[in-house]
Amino acid sequence: MKIIIVGCGKIGRALAQELSDSGHDLTVVDLNPDRLSQLTNTLDIYGVQGSAASYQTLLEAGVREADLLVSTVDADEINLLCCLIARQAGTPHVIARVRTPLYVDDIRFYREQMGLSMAISPELETAQEIS
C-alpha cells in the first residue's frame, strides 16, 4: 500500500516505523529538514521537505497515486487542509489528527463533507480510555 505520512514528530515517526516494518511503500512530508533526514536515513522510506498545505508538495510526495494519507502535524488546520487537498487529488483514504475540541465537535461534518476517512483525537482517546 502506498501511504503518505505528514509530520515527522512523535506520532509520525512511530507510525512510519510501524508501517515501514509492515512493508508499506511510505513517503513522509515535513518542513524540518533535520527531522526528515533523520527518519529517511533510519528507515527505507522517501522524504519530501515542504508544507503539506501546498498542493505542489503533495504532488511531489505522490498524492495522486497514494492509497492513504495520514496527517499528524500539531496544527489541526494544516491536517484538515492537507486531507482535503489529498481527497481532491484522488487519494481514496485520508486520516487527520485533530486536537482542538471545537474541531472534534465538528468531526461528523468533516467526514461527510470533506471526505475524511477518520479523525484521531489523542486527548479524547486518552480521556475515554481513562474513564
Image: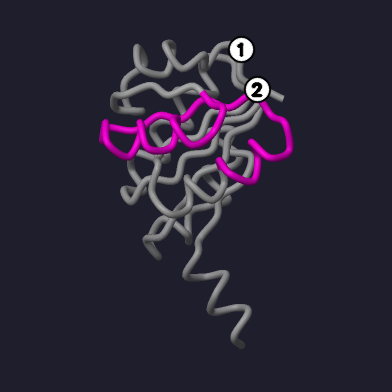
x, y percentage for residue 129?
A: 63, 79
Query: Residue at the spot x=44%, y=11% of the render?
Result: 59
Query: Residue at the spot x=53%, y=46% of the render?
Result: 109
What amino acid type should be assigned to the residue bearing mark 1? Glu
x, y percentage for residue 5?
A: 50, 34
- Colour mapping: one colour
Image quadrant containing the C terminus: bottom right
Asked if residue 76 is positioned above or below residue 58 in the image, the reply reads below
Residue 20 covered by magenta stretch: yes
Report, in whole angstroms, how far the alpha carbon at label 2 lies from the one at label 1: 7 Å
Q: Which residue is mark 1?
A: 65
x, y percentage for residue 85?
A: 44, 23
Mark 2 touching mark 1, by CB under 8 A?
Answer: yes
Query: Residue at the spot x=43%, y=24% of the render?
Result: 47
Relative placement, left or right, of 98 versus 127 is left
Residue 3 covered by magenta stretch: no
Q: Classify mark 2: residues with Cα within 10 Å, few (<14), some (14-19) or many (20+).
A: some
Image quadrant containing the N terminus: top right
Q: Which residues are magenta?
A: 16-45
x, y percentage for residue 96?
A: 50, 44
Asked if residue 15 is positioned above or below residue 113 in the image, the reply reads below
Seen from the viewer's position, the closer of residues 21 and 89 is 21
Relative placement, left or right, of 31 versus 47 is left
What SS does tag 1 mark?
loop
The quarter of the picture where residue 32 lies is top left
Asked if residue 79 is positioned above or below residue 83 in the image, the reply reads below
Front of the two marks 2 and 1: 2
Which of the marked residues, 2 or 1, is nearer the chain's N terminus?
Answer: 2
Task: Give the number of the disc on residue 2.
Answer: 2
Seen from the viewer's position, the closer of residues 20 and 99 is 20
Task: Give the number of the disc on residue 93.
Answer: none
Q: Classify mark 1: residues with Cα within 10 Å, few (<14), some (14-19) or many (20+).
A: some
